[in-house]
Image (tube, rainbow, N blue to C red):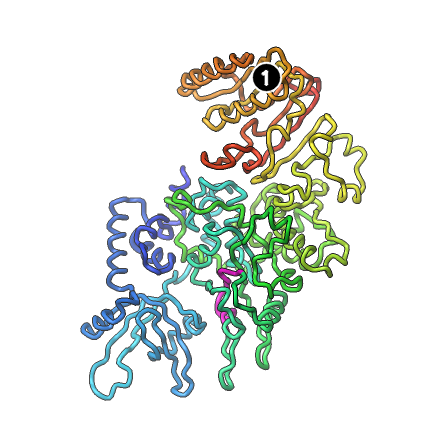
């Protein structure tokens, strides 16, 4: 059963085709969750005819009931003439203590101080948050004499799912593989999982952590156009997006009005997101706001007026970077673009996760989902309910981090771990490998914060640096945690050398492991190697991996069953060219390829390889091929070395044809893979 069919069967009535909201929305400034709420009423099926009819119904509702600010007076006229009308608008409420009543404001209709029944406010306290709640409202127009206010709110229904069963949602997890479940969530946030690799999916889904974890402190900085604020603005009616330059202590925490203290945004929303969280010319940040924020991020409490308040709202800070990551790592730090008042250790140490937004490609037409995903309002309600669960104790079953980490480091890792388990394994069922994948990501996300604190704040440098590594409970091995940008930019060795048998027998001391100097390719001793390259890692080339081992090799056997797609053939040609460069003095070179393909594709491949054979012959290279390879992948050289690659030559992620990456392997992002180079006598292929 294909994923789309699984989604429809598992979540009947709770799914929608994700591109439909874009078809209906046009230029309307209405959140996606509002449109999907309506689409879910009419289009939650896979029947194209019914979907087309449903779209027309939703368009009619939007046309007739959604209030455009430019048409507010026309709508008021309709209400007066009809006496009663249904509208869709953003409604907020305030208490008028002199009149002893709540009064509503209609954002688009332009009505103010309209009496609203206390029962509506009690059921929907977010109306009092000052930011408003999108609602379907039945509004009456009262005629006659001696009527002070002619507008009457007859009924108000917030646009959100009325009730959900969290257990039903959790029970469905077992019907999906992990990859399918991740892709379901990616479709749900409106993106196309086919254009994202697994690490990019993790980074994207990390944007949901503030929605699923109480008091989660999240930051993502990166280039424009990567969808940083999309999830926070479009996905959930439980979150609020505010401009970073317009936040005040009163709006965020509480304000004093006479003798009354009015709670701010953190008291009503699951997530408060600071959008465009970057330095703005001519604006300074209120020192009181920063101090109050620091206390809240650390202790979940804040003091305003005479009282101390506690809240569970998470904080998310999203903004654009001014420079590239290599520039920042060389000349400043990764927090350089945020408002200056916040660039201090006491504040930044409270950030649980720094999401590497620069790893996500700019959104393009093919970036958006055209498949089925959960209605955003439904998943938002699920995430809201999941906040009550805590999976952080499960971390102890898989890993134990070094004691040199501070309590804030441990807390950040635990909260990130718990949140990702809620998202990916809400039933708590996961393999050791899946759990450790989350552990690694959580550790790296916190280390990214800590690395920059050592640069920004000298008080952190005064203490012994934290050793970001953990003991793997399953086998007792120690695993080092490193950020990908440090690996890519040479702050640590760009390729992780896994210890050889000799190194295991005589392990290096902790000091030697920590301070081991980086060895250049020219200085490297030609010896057996086993290396691991991470997903999304840049700076890796065929030459840096095994260029030195190709010298003196005049007979090369390449065993790789997946030399079939055009880009894989390009990889083969690049590798053959590297063989030529390594053996310029060779009189002749013989290269044999053992690959495979489906029966219907082999005739086409024969034509391609015959053309390649003719071309290589002009360079003195004898090229032969056959289609007998199974799953094994290796390169066997007649100079005494054999190279085993877990992915064969297919180590690079897809890159654009018109890009620097097309010309330079160093600019390509890698798939995760391992490589082992042994002396041929020790390799099974020659047994």
The answer to whether 47 appears left or right of 554 in the picture is left
Q: Position of residue 405 (x, y in %)?
A: 71, 54
Residue displayed at 40% across by 20% down: 600
State the quadrant of the C terminus.
top right
Q: Quick one: 288 or 201, which is closer to the camera?
A: 288
Q: Position of residue 456 (x, y in %)?
A: 67, 58
Residue corresponding to mark 1: 557
Q: Quick one: 148 or 455, which is closer to the camera?
A: 455
**Where are the magenta residues, as a range?**
264-278
The answer to whether 611 appears left or right of 311 in the picture is left
Q: Position of residue 76 (x, y in %)?
A: 24, 72
Q: Is residue 268 magenta?
A: yes
Residue displayed at 73% across by 61% down: 459
State the quadrant of the N terminus.
top left
Asked if residue 297 is positioned above or below residue 649 in the image, the reply reads: below
Residue displayed at 39% across by 60% down: 161
Q: Position of residue 494 (x, y in %)?
A: 65, 38
Q: Residue furthest front?
A: 282
């Amino acid at each position: 059963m294909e994923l789309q069919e699984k989604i429809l069967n598992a979540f009947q009535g709770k799914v929608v085709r994700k591109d439909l909201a874009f078809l209906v929305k046009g230029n309307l400034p209405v959140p996606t969750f509002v449109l999907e709420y309506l689409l879910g009423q009419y289009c939650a099926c896979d029947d194209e005819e019914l979907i087309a009819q449903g779209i027309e119904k939703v368009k009619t509702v939007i046309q007739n009931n959604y209030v455009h600010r430019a048409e507010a007076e026309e709508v008021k006229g309709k209400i007066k003439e009809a006496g009663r009308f249904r509208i869709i608008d953003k409604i907020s409420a305030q208490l008028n203590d002199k009149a002893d009543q709540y009064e509503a404001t209609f954002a688009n209709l332009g009505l103010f101080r309209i009496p609203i029944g206390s029962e509506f406010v009690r059921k929907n306290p977010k109306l009092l948050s000052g930011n408003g709640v999108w609602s379907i409202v039945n509004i009456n127009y009262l005629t006659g004499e001696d009527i002070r206010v002619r507008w009457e709110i007859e009924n108000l229904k917030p646009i959100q799912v009325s009730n959900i069963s969290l257990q039903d949602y959790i029970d469905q997890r077992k019907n999906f593989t992990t990859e399918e479940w991740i892709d379901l969530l990616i479709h749900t946030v409106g993106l196309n999982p086919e254009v994202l690799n697994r690490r990019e999916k993790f980074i994207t889904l990390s944007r949901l952590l503030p929605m699923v974890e109480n008091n989660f402190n999240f930051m993502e900085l990166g280039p424009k156009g990567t969808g940083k604020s999309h999830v926070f603005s479009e996905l959930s009616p439980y979150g609020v997006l505010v401009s970073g330059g317009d936040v005040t202590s009163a709006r965020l925490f509480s304000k004093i009005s006479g003798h009354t203290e009015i709670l701010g945004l953190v008291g009503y929303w699951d997530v408060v997101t600071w959008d465009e969280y970057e330095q703005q010319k001519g604006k300074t940040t209120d020192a009181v706001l920063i101090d109050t924020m620091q206390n809240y991020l650390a202790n979940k409490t804040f003091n305003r007026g005479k009282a101390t308040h506690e809240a569970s709202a998470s904080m998310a800070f999203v903004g654009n970077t001014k420079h590239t990551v290599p520039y920042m790592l060389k000349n400043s730090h990764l927090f350089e673009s945020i408002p200056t008042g916040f660039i201090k250790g006491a504040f930044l140490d409270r950030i649980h996760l720094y999401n590497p937004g620069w790893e996500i490609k700019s959104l393009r037409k093919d970036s958006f989902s055209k498949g089925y995903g959960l209605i955003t309002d439904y998943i938002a309600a699920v995430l809201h309910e999941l906040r009550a669960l805590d999976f952080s104790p499960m971390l102890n079953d898989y890993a134990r981090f070094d004691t040199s980490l501070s309590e804030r480091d441990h807390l950040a890792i635990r909260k990130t771990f718990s949140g990702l388990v809620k998202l990916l394994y809400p039933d708590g069922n996961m393999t050791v490998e899946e759990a450790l994948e989350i552990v690694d990501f959580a550790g790296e996300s916190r280390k990214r914060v800590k690395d920059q604190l050592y640069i920004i704040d000298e008080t952190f440098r005064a203490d012994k640096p934290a050793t970001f590594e953990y003991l793997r409970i399953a086998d007792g091995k120690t695993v080092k945690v490193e950020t990908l940008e440090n690996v890519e930019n040479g702050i640590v060795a760009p390729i992780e050398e896994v210890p050889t048998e000799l190194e295991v027998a005589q392990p290096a001391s902790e000091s030697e492991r920590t301070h081991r100097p980086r060895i250049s390719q020219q200085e490297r001793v030609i010896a057996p190697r086993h290396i691991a390259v991470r997903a999304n890692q840049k700076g890796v080339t065929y030459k840096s991996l095994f260029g030195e081992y190709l010298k003196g090799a005049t007979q090369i056997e390449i065993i790789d069953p997946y030399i079939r797609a055009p880009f894989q053939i390009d990889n083969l040609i690049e590798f053959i060219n590297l063989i030529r460069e390594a053996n310029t003095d060779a009189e002749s070179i013989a290269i044999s390829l053992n690959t495979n393909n489906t029966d219907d594709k082999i005739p086409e491949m024969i034509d391609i390889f015959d053309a390649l054979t003719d071309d290589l012959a002009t360079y003195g290279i004898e090229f032969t091929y056959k289609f007998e390879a199974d799953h094994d992948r290796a390169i066997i050289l007649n100079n005494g070395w054999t190279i085993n690659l877990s992915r064969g030559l297919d180590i690079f992620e897809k890159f654009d044809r018109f890009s620097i990456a097309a010309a330079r392997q160093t600019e390509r992002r890698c798939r995760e893979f391992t490589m082992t180079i042994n002396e041929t006598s020790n390799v099974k292929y020659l047994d």
